[in-house]
Amino acid sequence: MRVHKFSGLLHIITVLFLVFYSLPSDAQLTETQASALMKAATEDSDPRLSLFVAFGLNAAMRHSEIVASRYDQIDFDNRRIFIPLAKAGEREQPVTQALASLLLRQQRC
C-alpha cells in the first residue's frame, strides 16, 4: 500500500484547522509558539507556507481571505489589505509592518 505525504502547505493548514477549532474562540498562541510556527513554516520546502503563516500571525484574516488576497488589493503605504469578499461584507484589514515588508519583498521576486 502506498501512502501519500501531504504537501507542506496542505498539511499545516489541516493541522491548524484541527488545532484552532478544538480551542476556545479566545485562545491565542504564545510568542514562543508563534515563533516556532513561523520557523517551521520558513524551513518548509513550499515558500507559500511561510507567507500563509505570516498572514495568519500578522493580519487577523480568515484562511479563505488569505488565499484570495492579491497584490492589487494591498495598500503598502497605509499597510492595509482590501478584502472585497469578507464574511461580513467588504472591509480594509490593517497589517503589521513586518507583514507589509514581507509582502513587498515577495511581490518583487
Image: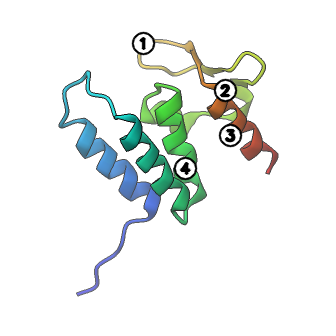
Q: How many angstroms separate mark 2 from mark 1 (CA)?
A: 25 Å
Circle nearer the N terminus (4, 2) = 4
The answer to whether 43 is drawn above or below residue 93 in the figure is: below
Q: Find residue 73 and report its horizontal and vertical position in percent.
A: 69, 25
Circle nearer the N terminus (3, 4) = 4
Q: How many angstroms separate mark 4 from mark 2 (CA)?
A: 16 Å
Marks 3 and 1: in contact by CB < 8 Å?
Answer: no
Please give the label number shown on residue 50.
4
- Residue at the outermost front position: 32
Closer mark to the observer between disc 2 and disc 1: 2
User: For mark 1, does the 10 Å Cα neighbourhood hold few (<14), some (14 to 19), or many (20 or more) residues?
Assistant: few
Q: How many angstroms separate mark 1 from mark 3 (CA)?
A: 27 Å
Q: How many angstroms separate mark 3 from mark 4 (CA)?
A: 10 Å
Q: What residue type is labelled 4?
A: Ser
Please give the label number shown on residue 88.
1
Circle nearer the N terminus (4, 1) = 4
Closer mark to the observer between disc 1 and disc 3: 3
Marks 2 and 4: in contact by CB < 8 Å?
Answer: no
Q: Which amino acid does label 3 sit on?
A: Leu
Q: Label 3, on which residue? A: 102
Q: Which amino acid does label 2 sit on?
A: Gln
Q: Label 2, on which residue? A: 97
- Residue at the outermost right position: 108
- Element carrying mark 1: loop
- Element carrying mark 4: helix
Q: Find residue 27 and report its horizontal and vertical position in percent.
A: 26, 27
Residue at (44%, 65%) from the top-left corner?
A: 7
Residue at (70%, 26%) from the top-left corner?
A: 74
Closer mark to the observer between disc 4 and disc 1: 4
